[in-house]
Amino acid sequence: MNQLFGYRAGNSFIHRLTGGTKLLAFLVLTINGMVSFDLRYLALLMVVAIAGLVVAGIRWHDVSAVVYFVGVFALMNVVLIYVFAPQYGVSLFHHKTMLLGTGPYALTLEQLVYELIVLMKYFFSLPLALIFLLTTNPSEFAAGLNKIGVSYRIAYAVALTLRYIPDVQQEFVTISHAQQARGYDMSKKALLVQRVRGAAGILMSLLFSLLARIDDINRSMDLRRFGKEKRRSWYYQQTFRRNDWVVLVGMVVLVLLEVVLIRVTGGQFKSMSLTRRACPNWMRLYFLKVVMRL
């Protein structure tokens, strides 16, 4: 089975990083990118994230399904943004450059730039999330969280969540095969009503299976007196090494670069010409040429 979010053991540069380093880099870079409206900086984050996928040895067929799903969701998001707020980019950038049409649904350069920014935020944060989920051992990650001050009860709960995501996927496939063996047709040739009925049966069976598993885990932890002590030891635990410091220094450089860009552009929404700064001249001319050809 293709595990979309399961940990995959490896010996790459990113695999050898501690869980705390990867979590900190993921959170800081994601937050930093989400507050940025500079296309140049977002493009840099996309390059860094894709390079991280390559370094981690994550193959396309391992993540293709989730990339397609997020891609469809992102496209639906930008379409709905234009449908319900066609002039939001104009109000955001305090500038208006008409490209096509008139009225409330007139196409403006600012709206195109804003929707491009939204898409780029999806596609730089997704690789970062995949790197974190596919290269981080849940137990080692829990030990790293506990080491930086997070309660071991919370850390262990997070580790359990990450550890059992692949098991839930496997359980779903097993139940699906069992339902099909009983005569439920889940193929594309089946009627929509039959497919919905079969999916509902799978989800109900999966829900009861998960509840039973949660009860078993809860009893096992109670029998082992989990949570009775203030501290606990960890089987998987890594110390900070040179690789971790290299990543942290690189992360600080990216954060400082964002601060410099914000100071140069005068803030996200203060400048009347922010669109020109966020979108280079060659891109603005390209948009205009495309519209003129239409």
Image (cartoon, grey):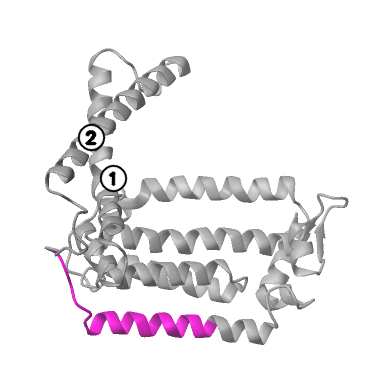
State left or right for residue 195 relative to residue 280. left
Classify the position of the N terminus by image quarter: top left
Residue 28 part of the magenta-drawn span = no
Q: Nearer the viewer, residue 275 or 245?
A: 245
Identify whether 54 is placed above or below 197: below
Q: Which residue is drawn at 59% across and 59% down?
A: 118
Classify the position of the C terminus by image quarter: bottom right
Crowding at label 2, few (<14), some or many (≥20) Cα neighbours within 10 Å?
few
Q: What residue type is labelled 1?
A: Ile
| SS for dot 1 | helix
State left or right for residue 170 relative to residue 71. left
Query: Any mark on residue 215, and which?
Result: 2
Residue 261 at what x, y percent from top left? 60, 83
Q: Which amino acid does label 2 sit on?
A: Asp
Residue 56 at what x, y percent from top left? 27, 66
The residue under label 1 is: 165
Which residues are drawn in magenta? 236-257
Residue 239 part of the magenta-drawn span = yes
| SS for dot 2 | helix
Q: Nearer the viewer, residue 263 or 238?
A: 238
Crowding at label 1, few (<14), some or many (≥20) Cα neighbours within 10 Å?
some
Identify whether 42 is placed above or below 255: above
Q: Residue at x 47, y 81 (%)?
A: 254
Residue 151 at what x, y percent from top left? 29, 62
User: Upstream in the sequence, badge 1 or badge 2?
Assistant: 1
Query: Can see residue 110?
Result: yes
